[in-house]
Image (cartoon, grey):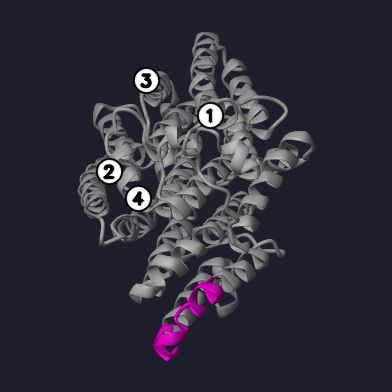
């Protein structure tokens, strides 16, 4: 291995460099200039996102522990775009509330450290690298969840997340140890060659799956989600809902479709059950919510259930469908969370009833929220319709017609509660509506990018065909 081989870790090295630059800037900047760290972080990460789309090489490092192929590299770029949008939407909150407490740099260090862990997790070639990435991606988010130290509910969210994550991590690690005991290796390639459906192997897989199910908020590992989303800063809640969940789904898909492929006749059965439970529980509990963050929390649980339909396919079609849906989900959910963040930052209001009459005072924000909710509901011609259509196609192609029918039922349920928010904004009147306000340039730019993504991917985009081509390169 020579120095040029480390270019395979180009994204990781650049992100680590940004971390070091921000720490140095925090030390060097005078106290009155601390707000410049926010602008610097967004600028540097924007460059990092652009560099990610430059030509790259495929290969592996450290004896196969770290691997990069075209599919992994593309998904890292998708995560980068999502984080860049999130940074744009978070800038005003950081400048108004966090920088004054001299904790702006700490937020970026925690966020980028978590993203770095996700890079390693989805590039892992063995369970050791996977677990290191899993821990590095999880621990900083627990600190971020309790970042608003003046709010007791924020501290409570951080405690709930770290305790739940510790339990899930321990269970997952125990499952990995059982898989090692039955296969004699921690490398994915070696395990795939010798894995068999013994009782110990099945138990190890179930425990390992439970750890990832926690990060994805699958039923019955979802109990932490709504409380943490409600207590955490909105930026952190959107990060958990979109970036963290997306990375966990991606690596789970890789492992199921390659390493655990010989066990498909076993894991497809309980994923079938978990998909149904996750869709129904997420949607039914979303009907009862009044707080927008809890509303979007249960919405994200239901969306995770829809994602499992793609896992039922187990082929190139399933791979392309899941990644395509995750791309759409990132734009749609960030658009919804962005509107919630803009309104909360300006007025402090976070309940659905507070949105009554919003269209009359803030029509642009209302339209962005409507597009986001329509996309999450799967209404044509926005992007979410095509994402769900391909998920249903992937499951139906394997004969899971009952599962598809029940998923359509859940789409109908989700459409009802998404329309409750739309009705409040457009049809309801309020004696004390949210007054007109104009968000600053970062927030407007972040929302604009999400709207463009929702419309372009939905109305015209060769993205699915491109992802389908990349999916043929699943060579773990």
**Which residue is label 4 attached to?**
186
Viewer-side label of 2, 3: 3
Q: Is residue 68 depicted above or below 376 in this figure?
A: below
Looking at the image, can residue 1 be seen? Answer: no
User: What element does badge 2 sit on?
Assistant: helix
Task: Give the magenta part as a residue range.
Answer: 26-41
- Tags 1 and 2 in contact by the CB under 8 Å rule? no
- Tags 2 and 3 in contact by the CB under 8 Å rule? no
Which quadrant of the view contains residue 323? top right
Which quadrant of the view contains residue 94? bottom left
**Which residue is label 1 attached to?**
429
Viewer-side label of 4, 3: 3
Q: Is residue 18 depicted above or below 331 in this figure?
A: below
The image shows residue 450 at horizontal and vertical percentages of 64, 47
User: What element does badge 4 sit on?
Assistant: loop
- Tags 4 and 3 in contact by the CB under 8 Å rule? no
Mark 4: few/some/many CA within 10 Å (<14, 14-19, 20+)? some
- Tags 4 and 2 in contact by the CB under 8 Å rule? no
Mark 2: few/some/many CA within 10 Å (<14, 14-19, 20+)? many
**Which residue is label 2 attached to?**
172
Q: Is residue 311 left or right of residue 74?
A: left
Work out how far the residue at label 2 is from the one at label 3, CA to CA, in angstroms.
21 Å
The image shows residue 359 at horizontal and vertical percentages of 61, 37
Q: Is residue 457 depicted above or below 418 in this figure?
A: below
């Amino acid at each position: 291995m020579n120095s040029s081989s480390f270019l395979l870790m180009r994204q990781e090295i650049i992100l680590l460099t940004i971390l070091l630059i921000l720490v140095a800037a925090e030390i060097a900047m005078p106290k009155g200039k601390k707000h410049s760290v926010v602008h610097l972080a967004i600028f540097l990460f924007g460059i990092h996102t652009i560099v990610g789309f430059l030509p790259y090489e495929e290969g592996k490092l450290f004896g196969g522990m770290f691997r990069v192929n075209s599919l992994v590299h593309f998904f890292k770029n998708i995560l980068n775009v999502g984080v860049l949008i999130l940074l744009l939407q978070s800038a005003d909150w950081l400048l108004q509330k966090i920088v004054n407490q001299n904790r702006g740099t700490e937020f970026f260090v925690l966020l980028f450290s978590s993203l770095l862990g996700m890079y390693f997790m989805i590039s892992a070639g063995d369970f050791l690298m996977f677990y290191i990435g899993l821990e590095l991606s999880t621990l900083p988010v627990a600190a971020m969840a309790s970042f608003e130290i003046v709010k007791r509910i924020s501290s409570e969210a951080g405690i709930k997340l770290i305790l739940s994550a510790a339990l899930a991590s321990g269970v997952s690690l125990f499952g990995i140890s059982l898989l090692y005991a039955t296969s004699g290796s921690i490398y994915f390639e070696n395990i795939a060659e010798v894995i068999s459906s013994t009782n110990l192997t099945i138990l190890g897989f179930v425990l390992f799956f439970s750890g990832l199910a926690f990060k994805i908020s699958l039923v019955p590992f979802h109990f932490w989600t709504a409380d943490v989303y409600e207590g955490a800063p909105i930026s952190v809640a959107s990060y958990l809902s979109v970036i963290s969940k997306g990375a966990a789904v991606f690596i789970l898909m890789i492992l199921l479709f390659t390493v655990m492929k010989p066990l498909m006749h076993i894991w497809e059965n309980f994923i079938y059950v978990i998909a149904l439970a996750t869709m129904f529980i997420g949607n039914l509990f979303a009907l009862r919510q009044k707080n927008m963050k809890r509303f979007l929390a249960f919405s994200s649980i239901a969306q995770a259930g829809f994602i499992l339909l793609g896992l039922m396919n187990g082929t190139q079609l399933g791979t392309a469908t899941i990644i395509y849906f995750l791309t759409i989900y990132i734009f749609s959910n960030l658009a919804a969370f962005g509107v919630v963040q803009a309104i909360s930052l300006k007025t402090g209001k976070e309940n659905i009833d507070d949105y009554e009459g919003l269209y009359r005072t803030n029509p642009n924000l209302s339209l962005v929220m409507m597009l986001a909710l329509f996309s999450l509901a799967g209404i044509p011609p926005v992007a979410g319709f095509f994402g769900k259509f391909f998920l249903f196609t992937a499951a139906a192609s394997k004969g899971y017609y009952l599962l598809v029918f029940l998923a359509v039922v859940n789409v109908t349920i989700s459409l009802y509660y998404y329309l409750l928010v739309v009705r409040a904004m457009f049809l309801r009147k309020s004696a004390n509506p949210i007054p007109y306000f104009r968000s600053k340039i970062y927030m407007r730019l972040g929302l604009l990018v999400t709207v463009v993504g929702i419309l372009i991917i939905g109305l015209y985009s060769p993205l699915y065909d491109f992802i389908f081509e990349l999916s043929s390169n699943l060579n773990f």
